[in-house]
Amino acid sequence: IWENLGGEFEDILYHRAEGMAKITINRPEKRNAFRPQTIIEIQKALESARFDESVGVVILTGAGDLAFCSGGDQSVRGDSGYKDDKGTHHLNVLDLQRQIRTCPKPVVAMVAGYAIGGGHVLHLVCDLTIAADNARFGQTGPKVGSFDGGFGASYLARIVGQKKAREIWFLCRQYDAKQAEDMGLVNTVVPLEELERTTVEWCREILQHSPLALRCLKSAMNADCDGQTGLQELAGNATLLFYMSEEAQEGRDAYLEKRQPDFSRFGRNP
Ligand code: 2NE
């Protein structure tokens, strides 16, 4: 079903079908570890999906069956971040995490194999996670000299609870798909061969529903965790809805027509 739109990309694949966009990290020889360029490409594809009015839901996944993503590519890790071709050091996956969270369309992680380290945080910040029965989850930061104290810590704790989040980070164990489901880390677990079919089914169900309602719900749930940034997102949706009303349009029209606005026909609801 997928149409390939990823011609310009080296580290990812970008596909679209029936209102779904699919972004695939395509570095299977490194268990889909990301380098700065990988993140830049995912950001571009996600931006493209956001502005594509035919797209209502985005799938994030990894190439092959062995890994969703194994986090930052340690072979390009410099002394202050991950090095790009010019030698600049990045932690640009943090920008991507925020972009996934603020994307006004649902983002669904489709996980086969390892979701580890920064790759684990990527699935975490997606709205839903569909896992194959071979999926394995975990953080490695304290083992490899790294940590994610942002969403990777506080949002993880919101999802699995404080004790479990501390266990995950302090012990750096791996958890199988069933354990992840029991913790509420993933929405469902399916046999590997049914992973894409199930993910597409879930996306089709989402696509039947009101895009504005989904958008407002996502920002409302973000607002509960994301402080003033979360409130800004929620309030931005209130402004969007207000702009769609005759009452707001009367204000705009009066300004453009150089007259006093007449709001008298609009009710003051209790
Ligand atoms: C993912 C895991 C558990 C897979 O194990 P396995 O046994 O299936 O594969 P293997 O043999 O370890 O890996 C296959 C190839 O992929 C490379 C390996 O070096 C190996 O290469 P070759 O020896 O065949 O040449 N590879 C895998 N992950 C890589 C990585 N992240 N960077 C570079 N090469 C990688 C196992 O591979 C594993 O534990 N990987 C490391 C996971 C990890 O520690 N990730 C970094 C966490 S820190 C982070 O992501 C981060 C952050 O904490 C904060 C901000 C930004 C990033």
Image: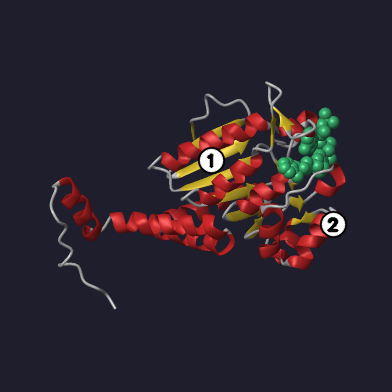
How many numbered circles does the render carry? 2
Amino acid type of the residue tagged 1 in the rendering: Lys
Quarter of the render that holds ligand 1: top right
Can you give x and y, in whole percent of width and height, for residue 1 in the image? 48, 39
The residue sitting at 80% across, 47% down in the picture is: 141
Can you give x and y, in whole percent of width and height, for residue 262 in the image? 15, 61
Q: Is residue 197 visible?
A: no
The residue sitting at 45% across, 42% down in the picture is: 50
Can you give x and y, in whole percent of width and height, for residue 25 in the image? 64, 36
**Residue farthest to the bottom?**
270
Left or right: 113 with respect to 56? Answer: right
Give the residue pinned by disc 2: 170
Q: Relative to the observer, which residue lies in front, 264 or 176?
A: 264
**In which image quadrant can residue 164 be found?**
bottom right
The residue sitting at 84% across, 53% down in the picture is: 172
Pair 2/1: label in front = 2
Helix, strand or loop at mark 1? strand
Can you give x and y, in whole percent of width and height, for residue 107 in the image? 54, 49
Left or right: 267 with respect to 60? Answer: left
Left or right: 18 with respect to 164? Answer: left
Q: Is mark 1 within 8 Å of ligand 1?
A: no
Quadrant of image for the C terminus? bottom left
Give the residue pinned by disc 1: 22
Q: Label 2: how many residues lie within 10 Å, few (<14), some (14-19) or many (20+)?
A: some
Which mark, by number, is residue 68? none
Helix, strand or loop at mark 2? helix
Q: Relative to the observer, which residue lies in front, 52 or 19?
A: 52
Q: CA distance from mark 2 to mark 1?
A: 33 Å
**In which image quadrant can residue 55 be found?**
top left
Amino acid type of the residue tagged 2 in the rendering: Phe
The residue sitting at 76% across, 61% down in the picture is: 165
